[in-house]
Amino acid sequence: MANSTTAISGQQHISLRKVLGPIHIWALGVGIVLVGEFTGWNFSMAKGGAWGALIACWFIGLLYTCVAMIDSEVTSTVAAAGGQYTQAKHIIGPLMAFNVGLYLVMAYTMLEASNAIVVGDLLKQLAGDMGSADISTRPFIVLTIVLLAWLNYRGVYATLNINFVITAIAFISIIILFFSVAPFSPGKVLLHKDLLTDLPYGWIGALGALQFGMWYYLGIEGTCQAAEEVRSAGRSIPLGTMSGMITLLIAAALTWYVAAGLMPWQYLGQAYTPLYDAAKLAGGGGLQAIMFIGTLFAALASANGCINDASRAWFSMGRDRYMPEWFGAVHPRYRTPYRAILFLVPIAVVFALVFVTALDLVIGFSILSGLLSYTFMSVNMIRFRKLWPLGSISRGYVHPFHPITAIVLLVLCVAVYFATYLGYTKMLLSIMVFYILASLWFAYHRYQYVKRGDQFTMAWPRPKGY
Amino acid sequence: MDLWTLISYAAWAVSIALFVWMVIDSFSVSKEFSEDFLMSSREGEE
């Protein structure tokens, strides 16, 4: 240890450890999202029925495909932690960067809290099945957050290797469930013919379903937070993100097909663990055990990825002094943003324990924070191609159909805002007020501390027109 | 005391131990290395 410390001290600069490959990017992106197939997406059934949930699956799938393509192109040129925050900083300016950074930290920390709540509830359910019904969820919620934070603190390589294993197991559990319900023999187990009704609340219901359709894919954009820690950002980020998006489209389709063929939309619209319920209906104890493990692992993988991403966003903001510079420190042995990881632990615990009975509020805040960052992403992309046209900067991936992709993304974001306005007006307005107040704080107080020119240290060419 | 009550207490104990370990480690790192070195990372640099 003494030798390694001496060696480390001899360096002039320290950096996050570059050890990740495409498989880790896949594990990060899919790991954050997959829990949404096990719980969350089904609330779209309550708004739009089974067909409404499928329409949401398609349209929100298109929204996230646009997000994945745009992220892949921009991040393949920006080998820096912070993801969309860093993109906004380089392409638009400090106020948008601050807002996007804050959206990211809030979205991931709240998502982490909601995942910890799910883990706590699952273990309480298991304890109840074993005859201990009066167990509190709190110790399991806190353990989930602290244990995963400790893992993240100790190093990114092991953290995302573990995420790969538990995410893969969770994904395989969905495939096992699919093949357990005789999917190619309609009417044998799956009863789509009887269960699929018309849109119960018409097209306005299908529009309302878009908000919860976000759960099929929410978080795939988190892949670009790892850009500073991959061995080759130009290769790993597009490969990991796009393969992750394909995995999620498959998982979403399988999930809807199995659940909609086994249970009526009225039940699914308020169910807490739809895939576990599907396993109860379709198979015996073995299948139930597999889906229980799948749900548990998916929630753990999501919380793990959220800690990774929230800490990178917070670390990047600290490094540029958008937040106190103290958070921009890198651990000299583990090469992780250890202060950002540690600082966010009590915040996630408070979110999880205070809002333990208001999971929908935590989820809603997380979804809207994500949606705000996607909205700005479409503007970022159009400006990115204007300032750095094709050929002016080395891109690991060039997304097709520009600017249609950015315009489609913007239109779909507006549709989801409208869907949120229909069902959660107060929440939408209160979140907007929160971010406006935060922006005022940044503009009139915090901006004076920001490293103006010094925050741009990447070897990018001068933008066109400057 | 049943098994799940014991597991609950163990969960609290492990949580506290890991959090305290991280806090102590972060303080020891701050004492061992200069702030300039700990905060010397730059985006886009190896």
Image (cartoon, coloured by chain):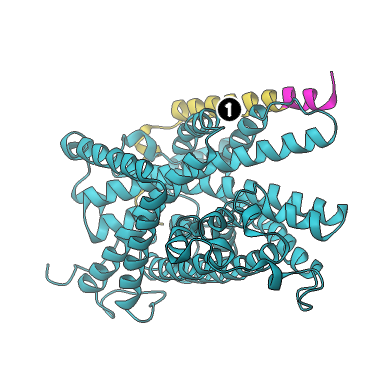
Chain colours: A cyan, B yellow
- In this picture, residue A226 sits left or right of residue A449: right
Q: Which residues are magenta?
A: B1-10
Foreground of the two, A6 or B31: B31
- In this picture, residue A225 sits left or right of residue A411: right
Foreground of the two, A68 or A431: A431
Mark 1 belongs to chain: B
Q: Image height check: is A280 above or below A72? A: above
Dot 1 amino acid type: Phe
Work out which residue is located at the far left of the displayed protein and give it.
A465
- In this picture, residue A76 sits left or right of residue A42: left
Name the quadrant of the C terminus of chain A.
bottom left
Label 1 neighbour load within 10 Å: few <14, some 14-19, many 20+: some
Residue B7 belongs to magenta span: yes
Could you say whether the residue bearing mark 1 is in a helix, strand or loop?
Answer: helix
Where residue A372 sits in the image (x, y, percent)? 34, 53
Q: Image height check: is A151 above or below A142? A: below
Where residue A236 sits in the image (x, y, percent)? 50, 68
Viewer can see residue A21 = no
Hey, which quadrant is residue A186 in on the image? Answer: bottom right
Residue A202 belongs to magenta span: no
Where residue A10 sits in the image (x, y, percent)? 44, 42
Name the quadrant of the N terminus of chain A.
top right
Q: Residue at x 24, y 37 (%)?
A: A437
Main SS type for the magenta part? Answer: helix
Residue at mark 1: B19
Q: Residue at x 66, y 57 (%)?
A: A167
Viewer can see residue A305 = yes
